[in-house]
Image (spheres, rainbow, N blue to C red):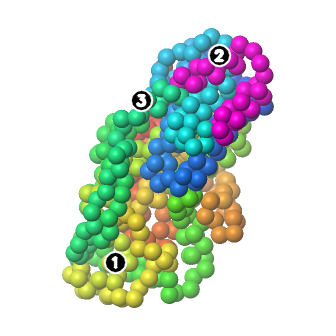
Amino acid sequence: MKKLLFVAMLVAGVGAGTPAVAEVKRPDIDSVRVWNELALTAVRTTRATDADAARLYAMVDVAIYDATNGLRSGHGRRAPALIGGSGPHGADPQAAAASAAHAVLVRADADRTATYDAQLAADLAALGPGVPVTRGAAWGDQVGAAVVAARADDGYRPVETQAAGAGPGVFRADWSGTQYRDVRPFGVEDPARYLPGAPPALTSEAYAQAFTEVKVLGDAAVPAPDLLATFQFWSLPAGSDQPPGEWLRIALTVSGQRHLPLGEQARLTALLTMALADTTVVTVATKYTYRHWRPTTAIREADTDGNPATEPDPAWTSRAGAVGGSPEWVSGHSSYSGAGAAVLAGFFRTDRIPFTHTTDSAPGGLPRSYPGFSAAAAEAGRSRIYGGQHFAFSDRAGQTIGRGVATEVLATRLLPT
């Protein structure tokens, strides 16, 4: 895995491939940032699930990438993400990017069409009149519409639900969205290769150790303001941009700090969001297959697990205040974080890029600073134990899933042609 990740970093990193014509970042609009911010807002407004959010982000950024990539020539052209072909000669790439994202969002979030129309009109006006802008807008609209059409039958609908289970070790509630276990991936060939297998047996020492840890660290009855704040910072419930959205925002922050040109911005966000969307598939498939119970149920009913090292506490309540809405194995927050951190480290060829970030659920909106991507991913994963939502083995397995998916996407997608 380490060797493959190293190769992925080499082929995916900044500077791989040289544009035929030097690309200059337009000072008047920043299409990648502007339209991703609109996608993030759409997820918040519609209260989209993490799975639906990851899919939307991927569609928007694949459309932006394919639209701008189709306007490049010679050594600057890379493999398409989904829609190939060349755009019209002389077309403006910023106009193409904005129009491609617009075409996705008006179809995916029709209730806010007026907002997207107004933003596109403002972007095109900022670019000025002329044939290049007109051609770019037309090409982008074509690509964005093609992306939506290509993903219409990817399996994300109709919504499926797994019924509640019963007995020791089994998740007890209905949970919806299970159709994502079979959704067609954006970047990996076979999501099943990243399935982690079963969690530790209830009677094992590994289970008992993780049980004891979350029972202590995730207990709402034990005051721990620092643990609560860390949990809340990464909790990202419905109405937020969801865990995939935070890694997209981190990417936008770092790419802005490094002043990446349009083509590199588009490639980064396409690689990232494809990996995040495909991580959903593996995560949901794992949850669906093993239906593992959450710590709240496990601790309250520990007298049924057959493990003499686990003591029941019928009154135990998680620091999060809730059981959790899907099976425990694996942690989706962790898998998204593993994927996000790995793509960013691979793209920039280093993990050690300091950044400051504020999540949608940060207490008081206060930011946190990190020395690199893996440090943020590690904290995001541990936050699930602090909230009493997951066992540590589920965090570790989720991180491994995300890194594996990210490594394949970096090594095989959007390569120079």
- Residue type at mark 3: give it: Ala
Give x and y (percent) for residue 138: 61, 19
Identify which residue, 3 or 19, lies in the foreground: 19
Main SS, magenta region, reads helix
First to last magenta residue range: 114-143
Do the CB atoms of the residues marked 3 and 1 lie less than 8 Å apart? no
Identify which residue, 401 or 221, lies in the foreground: 221
Q: CA distance from mark 3 to mark 1?
A: 42 Å
Q: Residue 150: which disc?
A: 3
Give x and y (percent) for residue 157: 36, 44
Give x and y (percent) for residue 413: 45, 32
Q: CA distance from mark 2 to mark 1?
A: 58 Å
Q: Residue 297: which disc?
A: 1
Residue 64: tell me if it is visible.
no
Identify which residue, 22 or 223, lies in the foreground: 223
Residue at coordinates 47% horizontally, 21% vertically from top-left?
A: 84
Q: Earlier in the sequence, mark 3 or mark 1?
A: 3
Residue at coordinates 51% horizontally, 27% vertically from top-left?
A: 145
